[in-house]
Structures are given as structure tokens and as C-alpha cells.
Amino acid sequence: MKIAIIGSGNVAYHLAKALKQTEQNLVQIFGRNQEVLNSISKELDIPVSINELAEADLYIISVSDSSVEDVSKIIKNPNAIVAHTSGSLPKKILKGDYKKASFYPLQTFSKSKDLDYADIPFFIEAEEKEVENVLIDVASKISKHVEIANFEKRKYIHLTAVFACNFVNHLFARAKEISDSQQISFDYFMPLIEETFDKIKSVNPKGAQTGPAVRNDKRILEAHKELIKNPEQLAIYKVMNASIQKMYNLD
């Protein structure tokens, strides 16, 4: 099975690394940024190109959602499997005469951060059972968690991921703004953050909620609002506390 990755961003890099580590036949990474591709090639010893797309049995398109459709048009092999890695696009976004599929890894990817690929869930969708089995085989060599998920399910997986990852990370960034403004090291909060995430491995998140909102401590809530001078921070503080209190019927 010859595999080619199209893209040079974070997801493409980590997929290439995962395929390389599992000794799968990754024949090329194809993209637009020669400098980035050269860096990946040097690190992972994989052929790269910005001009000519290699012949492959499986093309994994790992580019921004807005580029998937246009990129998919460059593949002309009718016998190939072409899969995108988006959680929020249907497989029909792929425009070409080939076997269309989705190959969605549920994780946040940064090139500078190593990952245990075996723990990353992969969600597979394909038009044919034979193609589905091929993709399951590829993903199963990388991960212990491989499932079938159609577009309707995948949309909600991606939405949940935005709440659980992107929004939470934004709250970390806003929290660091506050600590930085008072010359308080954000490192002090790492044990708290780690315990918060460790706890929900064994306790339902709703049952794990703590803080002044769930206690309905109006004095603390008002005192905090007086401290916050940044309007965006204040808006987040109000909407988050209102959401917590509504969930626990305290509003």
C-alpha cells in the first residue's frame, strides 16, 4: 500500500511521523511550502515535492478545510483511495473519479509537541466496505482506537472537540492574561489544571464541578467582577458563570 500525504501543516506532519513509526509505505509528502517540506523530509527521511504528485494507492489530504475541495481535484488516479482528515467535512467534498473517504484523527496537533499516536482515536468513513477495511488497517497500525463514523456523527465529534479543547485552551490563554497582569507565575496553576483533567477520567464532568458559581456564592462572584477590568475577560466570566448556574438550576 503506497501512501502519499498532501499537506505540510501540523496534522500532515504528525500523520507522516505516525506512518513512518509504524513502518508503513509513505512514498511522499506533497505540498506548497518547500522550506517546511524540506524540514519534514530531513527529520523523517520521506520524499517531498511541490511540483509532481507521486503515484499512490492512498492519498491522505491534510490541508485546511477551505482548501480540501480544490486540492482534491489534482488527483487523477481512478483506482486510488482519497481520504481527507477533516472532522467537519463530508467525503463528497472530494471532487474526482476515485474512491472517497474520511480519515479523521481526533487530537490537537502541534509540531513541537510529541504525541503517543496509539492513544489517538481515528474515525473512518468510506463509500465501500473494501475501502473501509483498508483504512481501518492503516489506522489500526497507528492507534488502538479506530471506529467507523459517518459524517453526521463526525460533525458532533468535531463540535464536542471544539468545546473540550479549543474553548478550554482559550480559557487558559485568558487566565494567563490575568496572572501575567499581576506578575503571578502561570506555573503555579499547572497542578490545578492537571488535577482538573485527571479528575474527569473517573468523575463525570458535571459531578466534578467546583467553584463559586456552583456554590452560588454571590459575594465572591460580585467581588471577581469588580476585579476584572478587561471587557472580554468580564464577558467570559459572566457567560461561564451563567452557564454553570443554569446547568445546576441555580439561575
Image: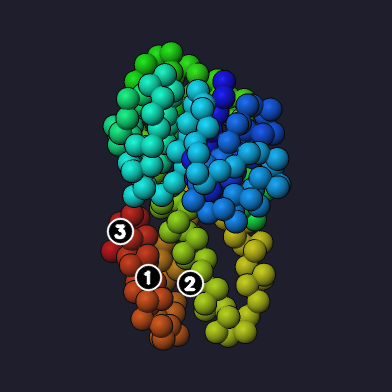
Point out the frontmost of discs 3 and 1: 1
Q: Nearer the viewer, residue 16 or 164?
A: 16
Residue 35, compared with residue 84, is above or below; it is below
Task: Please state if 199 lies on the left or on the right of 236 as rendered.
Answer: right
| Element at label 1 | helix
* Quadrant of the image containing the N terminus: top right
Q: How many marks?
A: 3
Indicate the quadrant where residue 44 lies.
Answer: top right
Residue at the spot 40% in from the left edge and 32% down from the top edge: 75
How many neighbours does mark 3 have within 10 angstroms: few (below 14), some (14-19), or many (20 or more)?
few
Which residue is denoted by mark 1 in the rendering? Answer: 236
Q: Nearer the viewer, residue 228 or 7?
A: 7
* Quadrant of the image containing the C terminus: bottom left
Which residue is denoted by mark 2 in the rendering? Answer: 174
Examine the rendering and report whether any part of residue 169 can be seen: yes
Q: Earlier in the sequence, mark 2 or mark 1?
A: 2
Residue at the spot 48% in from the left edge and 31% down from the top edge: 59
* Marking on residue 246: 3
Q: Are marks 2 and 1 in contact (CB under 8 Å)?
A: yes
Give x and y (percent) for residue 71: 38, 42
Examine the rendering and report whether any part of residue 126 can be seen: no
Residue at the spot 59% in from the left edge and 60% down from the top edge: 193
